[in-house]
Image (tube, rainbow, N blue to C red):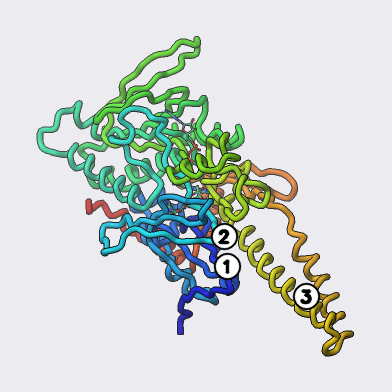
């Protein structure tokens, strides 16, 4: 029988916010018998984000990279309570969080409070728009499953509308122009997937308008993929150009309308030029911004007054200025890049820390019990003294937890036409490679990282399916 959740008054209540990379890594390794564990997230599944760009074109079906949180929690030794809700505020004084059911179906109760003894915040980040006018209203983003579905639908809507009888040439050009803003890994991977979709499927299925299809990638900095090595940046830019993706670097988008992007280009002579680019689909991928719940918490904690990019944490991931709140992943500032790799290592670290903290408490309680027995001279005192000594030895080892240190395994990105780039740690040095072999490495690495065997099998089947039959272009 499955374990039933009943809050045990002798145990501390550990509330975990989010079901992303950080929180799920924590839940996977946490010994749930030690705490009353409560998970709150508006998303009742874990999302394997590295393969999200492939869902925008149907290379992979979205459910293949989702893992229901209830399936994950079912395998834990002690039951864990899950609430599909958004935490709307955190009160560190009263040690309670407020939660709201933000889903479509609401019951008579859709807002309540949860008290905590320990709180882990893993709510991730939201999309940065830098307040640029028109972005929120007119762009698609690429962070959640719904975003990928919306993009997939919109690509085909643009294609079918461009193929409409009597469409003017100018309008066909606009509709078939797919603009991606942000040359970070999200923007580059999406542009690559889009070009593949066009080359492998749209060209065959809608040949009459295919010469007008164009992908433009706009980046404010002088290069795309700024976090990769120079050699891989050059390789990526050359490959994207070969794929006929138009890369516009040193170009900063300043305004977006329903049909155009207005950008400022820095000329080599240092001057600036304004350009207007008509588009059919606009995907905005300019990185992360802080979520409102985190902004609100920052204002409540005086020690966080200088925090701008997220919650400042110490080397044990404790939120600075608090005692029992930890933050992991994209909402925490620990000195590392906002990546899945960092978030999951942080989650693993907290699981070890919490497992050890629970052991410490049990050992300390036992030592106290034995010591009072010794003081009362009851029972076998030599045996008790020996047990105390052994427990103290174990305690010293448990308490000696080293602070969190991130170990970088490398960076990988797909760049289209079955090529990928990889900056990986190799022995004691770094290896920078790009090309078709790297693509196979990329595929195997991501497959091995998938959450479950079920996900792995589904992803392989999707790859085979789209290769054999082409991508499904029905507009749902
Ligand atoms: P997330 O994984 O974003 O999870 C946040 C969770 O919190 C979600 O479950 C969300 O629903 C929940 N939540 C939100 N608000 C609330 C609230 N108010 N209350 C409770 N819960 C809330 N990184 C890599 O290392 N390698 C890659 O290849 C890679 N590819 C990527 C591709 C794409 C398209 C994207 C968008 C990102 C990619 N990343 C990659 C980055 C990586 O996904 C993030 O760094 C990672 O998801 C951060 O993990 P997290 O746990 O902090 O947040
Ligand atoms: P990012 O922050 O890495 O890149 C955003 C880019 O947008 C920047 O290069 C920035 O200069 C540009 N930009 C910002 N404003 C602009 C404007 N107005 N006009 C034009 N360009 C503008 O964002 P991301 O690609 O979404 O990645 C977010 C995080 O997730 C990063 O840490 C990244 O490493 C990680 N990630 C990793 C992978 C991977 O490893 N394959 C894939 C996706 C995301």
Q: Callout 2: few (<14), some (14-19), or many (20+) C-alpha neighbours within 10 Å?
A: some
Q: Callout 3: few (<14), some (14-19), or many (20+) C-alpha neighbours within 10 Å?
A: many
Residue 466 in sight here: no
Question: What numbered label is drawn on residue 367?
Answer: 3
User: Where on the picture, by quarter, is residue 227?
Assistant: top right
- Residue occupying the point 53% across, 35% down: 308
User: Where on the picture, by quarter, is residue 338?
Assistant: top right
Residue 348 in sight here: yes
Please state, as top left, top right, bottom left or bottom right, where the C terminus lies in the image. bottom left
Q: CA distance from mark 1 to mark 2?
A: 7 Å
**Residue 365 drawn above or below residue 105:** below
Question: Could you tell me which secondary element the residue under label 3 belongs to?
Answer: helix
Q: Nearer the viewer, residue 100 or 19?
A: 100
Pointer 3 or 2: first along the chain:
2
Classify mark 2 as within 8 Å of ligand 1 or not, answering yes or no.
no
Q: CA distance from mark 3 to mark 2?
A: 24 Å
Asked whether the beta carbons under mark 1 and mark 2 sit within 8 Å of each other, the answer is: yes
Q: Position of residue 179 (x, y in %)?
A: 34, 33
In the rendered image, which residue does mark 2 sit on? 118
Question: Could you tell me which secondary element the residue under label 2 belongs to?
Answer: strand
- Residue occupying the point 57% across, 39% down: 302
392 relative position to 462: left or right: right
Question: Could you tell me which secondary element the residue under label 1 belongs to?
Answer: strand
Asked whether the beta carbons under mark 3 and mark 2 sit within 8 Å of each other, the answer is: no
Q: Position of residue 322 (x, y in %)?
A: 60, 49
**Residue 239 drawn above or below residue 343:** above
Q: Nearer the viewer, residue 36 or 185?
A: 36
Pointer 3 or 1: first along the chain:
1
In the rendered image, which residue does mark 1 sit on? 12
């Amino acid at each position: 029988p499955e374990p039933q959740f009943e809050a045990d008054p002798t145990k501390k209540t550990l509330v975990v916010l989010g079901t992303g990379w950080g929180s799920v890594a924590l839940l996977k390794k946490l010994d749930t018998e030690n705490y009353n564990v409560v998970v709150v997230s508006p998303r009742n599944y874990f999302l394997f984000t590295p393969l999200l760009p492939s869902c925008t074109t149907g290379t992979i079906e979205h459910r293949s990279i989702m893992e229901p949180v209830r399936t994950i929690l079912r395998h834990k030794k002690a039951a864990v309570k899950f609430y599909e809700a958004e935490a709307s505020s955190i009160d560190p004084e009263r040690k309670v969080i407020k939660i709201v059911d933000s889903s479509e179906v609401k019951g008579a109760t859709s807002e309540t409070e949860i008290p905590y003894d320990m709180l882990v915040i893993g709510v991730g980040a939201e999309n940065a728009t830098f307040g640029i006018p028109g972005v929120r209203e007119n762009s698609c983003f690429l962070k959640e499953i719904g975003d990928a579905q919306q993009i997939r639908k919109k690509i085909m809507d643009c294609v079918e509308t461009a193929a409409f009888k009597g469409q003017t040439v100018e309008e066909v050009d606009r509709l078939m122009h797919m603009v991606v803003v942000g040359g970070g890994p999200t923007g580059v991977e999406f542009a690559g997937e889009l070009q593949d979709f066009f080359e492998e499927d749209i060209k065959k299925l809608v040949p009459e308008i295919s010469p007008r299809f164009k992908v433009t990638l706009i980046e404010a900095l002088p290069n795309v993929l700024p976090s990769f090595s120079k050699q891989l940046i050059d390789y990526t830019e050359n490959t994207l150009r070969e794929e006929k993706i138009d890369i516009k670097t040193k170009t900063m988008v300043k305004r977006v309308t329903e049909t155009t992007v207005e950008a400022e280009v820095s000329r080599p002579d240092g001057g600036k030029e304004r350009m207007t680019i008509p588009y059919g689909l606009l995907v905005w991928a300019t990185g992360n911004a802080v979520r409102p719940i985190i902004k609100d918490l920052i204002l409540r904690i005086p020690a966080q007054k200088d925090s701008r990019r997220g919650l400042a944490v110490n080397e044990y991931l404790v939120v600075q200025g608090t005692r029992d709140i930890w933050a992991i992943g994209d909402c925490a500032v620990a000195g590392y890049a906002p990546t899945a790799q960092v978030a999951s290592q942080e989650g693993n670290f907290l699981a070890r820390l919490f497992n050890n903290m629970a052991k410490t408490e049990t050992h300390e309680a036992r030592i106290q019990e034995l010591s009072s027995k010794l003081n009362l001279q009851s029972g076998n005192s030599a045996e008790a003294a020996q047990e105390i000594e052994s427990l103290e030895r174990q305690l010293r080892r448990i308490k000696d937890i080293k602070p969190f240190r991130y170990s970088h395994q490398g960076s990988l990105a797909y760049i289209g036409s079955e090529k990928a780039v990889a900056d990986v740690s190799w022995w004691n040095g770094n290896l920078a490679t790009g090309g078709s072999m790297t693509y196979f490495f990329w595929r195997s690495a991501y497959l091995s990282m998938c959450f479950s065997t079920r996900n792995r099998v589904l992803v392989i089947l999707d790859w085979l399916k789209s290769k054999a039959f082409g991508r499904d272009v029905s507009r749902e």
